[in-house]
Amino acid sequence: MEYQFNSGMGISSISFIPTPSGGGSPAWGAITGTLSDQTALANALNAKAASASLSSAAYTLSTQYASSTHVHSASDVTSSTFALARMGSGTPNVSTFLSGEGTWLLPVYANLSSLPILGTAASTNAVLYALTSQISSAAYTLISNYATAAQGTKADSAVQPGTLSSAAYTLLTNYATSTQGLKANTALQQFGYASGGGAVTQLTGKGTGVTLNTPCGTIVMMSTALAAATITSFIVTNSLATSTDLIYAQHESVGTLGAYQVTPNTYAQSSFKISVRNNTAGSLAEAIKLRFTLIKGVVS
């Protein structure tokens, strides 16, 4: 015997085998039981869609899904950005670049002219700076190009040799100390000693020597008489003086100004002389005050 079911399911009929003689329940192929009880099976089959019409994800075979790991071409990426750490080995930061070998590296330049122009006033292309051999402004000068404290002041390369540069070109710390050489006052643009002067007075006469171990200072001469058109000299012992130094001295105050000619001379190691001439036609007995400054010098 044969019963028809929903042909849309691809099932056209189902057959059963009558109960053989002798009694028992009828058999429906592999399904057993009373025929009226098989309506549940028919209803269940009717609720199913044909296999040819399956389209939702609920009915899709697992083989039709992408695997958990797969590869895309670069052209498939149309938005967002990659994490820098994923683009190469090494450490990405503002100082490194991604090399052709896939590594984040620090740039290395063969020479100064290959440095890039960074675009700000504080970061100028190196080729716009003068070489050390062409330096003419303190803004471009390395500290090493200035004299050490033991060498005294240094001439600026832009001016004539032997002409001292202005304090604006040199840090105050690059000048010699008051006991080693001249010092510049950066605030006032002045040239000279900032400190370290001294004073001394002759004891017995205008030819009596004095000792003053400072780079500058005053000397008060005795008031003994100095005849007209006469020269007297005395030795100044000074531990800072050398035979290559230059001494500047003048009549500062006390006595008849303009009446005397003051001449430093006889430079030696640790001493020099000062000669004073009475330029008037009469004798002068005045305790005149002299001022001197020692300027360090070398011959090579």
Image (spheres, rainbow, N blue to C red):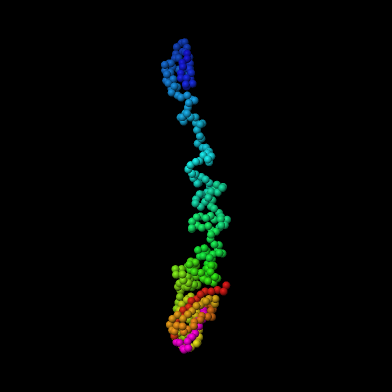
Q: Residue at x 54, y 67 (%)?
A: 157
Residue 215 visible to the viewer: yes
Front residue of 135 and 110: 135
Residue 173 visible to the viewer: no
- 76 part of magenta stretch: no
Quadrant including the C terminus? bottom right
Q: Residue at x 49, y 31 (%)?
A: 62
In this view, 12 is above or below 162: above
Q: Position of residue 16 (x, y in %)?
A: 47, 15
Q: Position of residue 183 (x, y in %)?
A: 48, 71
Q: Position of residue 144 (x, y in %)?
A: 53, 65
Q: Residue furthest top?
A: 21
In this view, 89 is above or below 125: above
The total number of labels drawn is: 0
Q: What residue range appears in magenta?
A: 271-285
Q: Residue at x 46, y 68 (%)?
A: 186
Front residue of 54 and 121: 121
User: Which image quadrant for residue 289?
Assistant: bottom left
Q: Residue at x 55, y 54 (%)?
A: 108
- 280 part of magenta stretch: yes
Q: Position of residue 280 (x, y in %)?
A: 47, 87
